[in-house]
Structure formats: C-alpha cells, structure tokens
C-alpha cells in the first residue's frame, strides 16, 4: 500500500492541507469534505478491494483520493481547476496507483472503471450521473446536494417523485446511505448533502425504445399536474406522435386519466411502449395503403 501520510483524524488535518496550499474554495463548486469521519465512511461504503479501479470526479486537494488509493488497485482522479490539479500532482506524483486527469468530467472521454466514488460538483450532478450511467460499472458512492438525492430515490405519489427518479430507476438501484451536514465541509455549502449508493443493473421493466421513453418521461413530468392524456397532447410538439388523437384514444384509459406523478416507472414504460407499437402499426398501414 502507498507510503505517505494520510490526512485523517478529525477536521484539523484536511484543514491544514487547505491552509498549506492556500486553497479557499468557492469557485467551481469547491466545498472540501474536511470531516475525516465522513471521508472514512464513504471509503468503507465503497467496499474496495485490491482489484478495483476507482474513478473520482472532482478530486480537489486529494483528501478522498488518498484514502481510496490505500484500498484500491488504482484511482483515476479527474479535476477541472488547474490550481488543484497542481496540488494533486504535488501530493501524488510519486504514488504509483493514482492517475490524475486534468479536465472537465463532462467533456473528457471517461476511462474504464469498476467503481466511481466522488464528492461531486453539484452543478453538474444530473449530467455527470447520466454520463456515468451509460458506462458499465459495479458501484457508485456519490455525494449530492440532499434535495437532489431525495429526488433520485423517491416513489410515486411523493412530492420528490420526478423525471430524475424514473431515469435513475431505469438504470440503477439507488439508496441514500447518509445525510451529511453543511459543517462537514469547508467552505460550508448553503445546503445539506447526502451520499447515494448506486448499483447499475438492467431495467426491471421492458422499454422498447430507450430514447423515446426518456423523452416521454421528460415530457409528461414537465406537465406533472396534468392528466397523462393532456400532458401527452400538450407536449406533442416534442414527442411528435403521428395521428395523436387516434393514438391517445387507443391508450389505456386508467393510466391516461392519471397524472405522471401517480404512475410507477413501470406503468410509464407500458404507456411509452404502447405508443411505440401504435406508431409502428400506423406506419405499416400507411405503407400498405401506398
Ligand atoms: N474531492 C474533494 C472533497 O471531497 O473534498 C472536492 C470536492 S468539491 C465538492 C468538487 C470538486 O470538483 C472541486 O475540486 C472542483 O474544482 C471540481 N470540479 C468542478 N467542476 C468539475 C468538472 N466539470 N469536472 C471535474 N472536476 C470538477
């Protein structure tokens, strides 16, 4: 294992690291996790073994990176801020199992990895999560703004149930592992945070056309208080369903008279699948008639 001091044991050691490099944070969503107790709990939840390649998005000053590298085969640390990239090189260039990638996690081609463990920059939460979920990996242990995490794991008929809940459920099992208070960070963010455990798996229900399902879910949740029938009608400039009135008349009345927020992900997938089937048969009939 790596032979260098770990900044652990309370708040003061990570703080002294921030002081040593004169890092103030604030820009680029920089809120450093200074509480060693939470850092250790995140590493424990990652269940790292010597075969694991770990991706870390937004490595900052390396407070989490150093802990992950002690347990994993390799840590690939991505960081956008050139000042922090210099800190990471200064601290870890002699450590063989830490690779540093300077760049924007949204723009770079992500390397292959087994697990992703990160205290994410909150402004890219949604985009980076769905970028990650298009890769094959075993486990994600990811810190988000608490409200965002609550929406990821919500259920139908709850106020947090949203497009994000359905999209997350399509790709992975998600659960909140712990809530993390503002004062665990320096500088403290304005909101509380939560660590999510994400386990990718095949969707637990059939989806005939993934791109259409995603568009359909986005469209009907943009009209979450409307009955599904009206939401689909209002959003057809985006969904582009041909012969829309005819199609809607053939969709199951019990679901079309409910709101998106009252339907399970599986029920939403059923309606989306039926629309795809109806579109296909309409097209076939048109071709026959030609
Ligand atoms: N890992 C450190 C920790 O746990 O204390 C820092 C976490 S801080 C919440 C988020 C980090 O992501 C910052 O270091 C910030 O510079 C970096 N960052 C922000 N946007 C980024 C992006 N698009 N790509 C990669 N890193 C980014």
Image (cartoon, rainbow, N blue to C red):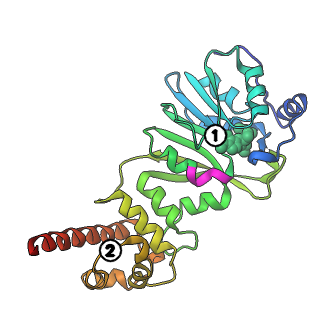
- Where is residue 15 drawn, in percent x and y? 86, 35
Question: What secondary structure is the magenta-colored segment mainly?
Answer: helix
Q: Quadrant of residue 106?
A: top right
Read off the residue under disc 2.
241
- Where is residue 247 drawn, in percent x and y? 27, 80
For the C terminus, give its image quadrant: bottom left
Quick check: 175 above or below 235?
Answer: above
Front residue (pair 103, 181): 103
Instruction: Residue at 39%, 71% (x, y): give it.
Output: 239
Q: Is residue 39 magenta?
A: no
Chain part drawn in magenta: 123-127
Q: In 3D space, how far apart are the residues under numbered discs 1 and 2 (Cα atoms)?
A: 37 Å
Of pointers 1 and 2, the one earlier in the residue sequence: 1
Front residue (pair 287, 257): 287
Q: Quadrant of residue 145?
A: bottom right
Describe residue 109's horizontal placement relative to residue 217 as left or right. Answer: right
Secondary structure state at the residue bearing disc 1: loop
For the N terminus, give its image quadrant: top right
Using the rendered image of the protein, determine whether residue 178 is visible from the camera's viewpoint: no
**Is the distance from the Cβ of mark 1 to the nearest ligand 1 atom less than 8 Å?**
yes
Secondary structure state at the residue bearing disc 2: loop
Graded by Cα atoms within 10 Å as few (under 14), some (14 to 19) or many (20 or more), the crowding at tag 1 reads some
Read off the residue under disc 1.
104
- Residue at the extreme front of the image, as rendered: 290
- Where is residue 92 drawn, in percent x and y? 71, 20
Quick check: 196 above or below 92?
Answer: below
- Where is residue 215 drawn, in percent x and y? 42, 65
Instruction: Residue at 54%, 53% (x, y): give it.
Output: 175
């Amino acid at each position: 294992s790596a032979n260098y001091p770990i900044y652990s044991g309370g708040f003061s050691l990570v703080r002294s690291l921030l002081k040593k490099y004169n890092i103030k944070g604030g820009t680029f969503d920089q809120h450093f996790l200074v509480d060693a107790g939470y850092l250790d709990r995140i590493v424990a939840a990652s269940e790292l073994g010597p075969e694991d390649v770990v991706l870390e998005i937004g490595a900052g000053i390396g407070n989490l990176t150093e802990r992950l590298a002690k347990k994993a085969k390799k840590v690939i640390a991505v960081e956008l801020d050139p000042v922090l990239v210099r800190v990471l090189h200064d601290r870890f260039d002699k450590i063989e199992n830490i690779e540093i990638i300077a760049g924007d996690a949204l723009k770079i081609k992500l390397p292959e990895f087994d697990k992703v463990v990160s205290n994410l920059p909150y402004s890219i939460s949604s985009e980076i999560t769905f970028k990650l979920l298009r890769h094959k990996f075993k486990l994600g242990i990811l810190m988000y703004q608490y409200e965002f995490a609550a929406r990821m794991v919500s259920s139908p008929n709850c106020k947090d149930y949203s497009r994000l809940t359905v999209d997350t459920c399509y790709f992975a099992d998600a659960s909140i592992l712990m809530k993390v208070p503002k004062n665990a960070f320096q500088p403290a963010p304005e909101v509380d945070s939560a660590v999510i455990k994400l386990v990718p798996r095949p969707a637990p229900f059939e989806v005939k056309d993934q791109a259409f399902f995603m568009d359909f879910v986005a469209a009907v949740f943009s009209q979450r208080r409307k009955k599904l029938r009206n939401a689909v009608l209002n959003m057809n400039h985006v969904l582009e369903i041909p012969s829309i009135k005819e199609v809607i008349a053939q969709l199951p009345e019990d679901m079309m008279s409910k709101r998106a927020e009252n339907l399970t992900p599986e029920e939403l997938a059923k309606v989306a699948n039926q629309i795809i089937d109806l579109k296909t048969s309409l097209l076939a009939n048109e071709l026959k008639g030609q």
